[in-house]
Amino acid sequence: MSEPFTAKAKHGAAQVLAPVTRRVPGADEAAFVYLGRQPILDRNGALNAYELLFRSGAHNYAQVSDDAQATAQVVARTIGGIGVSAVLGHYRGYVNIGPDLLYDDIVHLMSPDRFVLEILETVTFDARVLRRLGELRRAGFQVALDDVSELSEALLSVLPHTDIVKIDFLLTPRPELPALAATVLEAGKTLIAEKVETREDFALARELGFHLFQGYFFARPQVLAAPRNRSSRPALLRLLALLARDAGIFELEAELKRNPNVVVQLLRLVNSSAFGLGRNIASLREAIIATGTRQIARWAQLLLYADGGDLPWRSDPLVQLAGTRSRFMELAARWMRPSDEEFADAAFMTGIFSLVHVVLGTTPAATLDRLGLAPLIRDAIVEHGGALGTLLRIAQAADGGAEEGGDAASIAAAAADGAAGFAALTPSVLAELNLSAAAWFGAHAGME
């Protein structure tokens, strides 16, 4: 990354792109979302790209305790909160990717045409990581190595699997710069000088053949701010109910038209993601078709549990429970039936709807019957019926929300005699899925 987390930089001079606005002094910071961006320039001083940086408020320095959480918020705010066109214009955005997010679904919310994956120095470049980098590059992403400061065996091993190398001018000893730069250039990679803070550093980098430049000598990060979109929880609930029962395009369109905040985020999502359309979409119907119900459901469920509470999302126990339970059920369903994507989707939605009565302060039966939810999911929640009902009981036991005795492993073992797939949910598998679900929540808890 281009800045130390403790750096207290001043606001940059660049003009904020519409509709992004500067924070009004004295305004409630909770009413806004914030994002930092720092320009990356070419040899002529022209803008080439931006690095996108986490900002928790209007202050222009990072306060990061969790790299994955920070990146999730950067991606969510760029795509759904502020908008890619407002943040990036026609340029690309570099986004930090640590070990927790390298394999996460959040990567695929970004378009390879608009985002560069900047791999943090905390990633260990073993065979598994190198395979993953190959997958991402084949998907169209450019991969950048961040904070490189020495010519090491690790660098030489990962160099063939990357496109861009960012060399840290604050950490790299000056005598080692020529050999390091020459090695990267000989490999045919784009070379970026980062943390360039003086005219002398810039002159040296140009002399050594660096292609791009970033640092306080050129511009300090600029803080962008936009009003936080708040969506009606009952409206999101109705939308999720329609998605869960495979409602048609006309029903989804009619429901979305009643919720302009959700429509704004949906259009931002589809216009910034890798749908291969080659054009922006303005029609709501086109947006629904292009996005797909699965992506809409993911965003809607995150918004459902994020909005309306007094606690920050990451600290809200209901949000934690909803996020981990729905993801746990989806992972368990895939483990049971690897080729049955419909079962996995139904399991995910069952996990979401298993807690909506808490949000609305009523009973499960009253809530779900009023929504006209799909019978399969309704019966799983209210009656614990079918395979989904058993899976919900396992999830409740795993997250401590069970209303009856029994641990997750014993419920799965008992169900194995009468239903296919549950035998695969051994105690060790359940423990692993529970950890994976918690990690997924941690990575996505900032997508507001």
Image: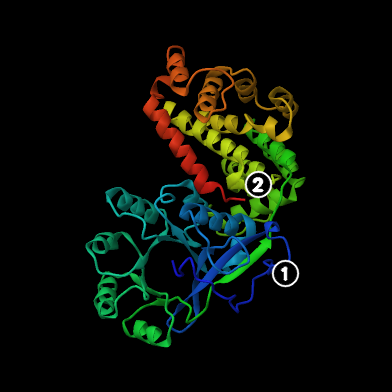
Question: Seen in the image, is 306 located left or right of residue 214?
Answer: right
Q: Position of residue 386 (x, y in %)?
A: 55, 18
Q: Position of residue 155 (x, y in %)?
A: 27, 63
Q: Residue type at mark 1? A: Pro
Q: Nearer the viewer, residue 38 or 268?
A: 38
- Above or below — where is 51 with respect to 234? below
In the picture, the disc for residue 311 is 2
Q: In which quadrant of the rendered image does the N terminus lie?
A: bottom left
Q: Nearer the viewer, residue 348 or 393?
A: 393
Question: Seen in the image, is 99 located left or right of residue 229?
Answer: left
In the picture, the disc for residue 259 is none
Q: Which residue is mark 1?
A: 25
Q: Position of residue 122 (x, y in %)?
A: 36, 57
Residue 421 seen in the current view = no
The secondary structure type at the circle numbered 1 is loop
Residue 204 image-quadrant placement: bottom left
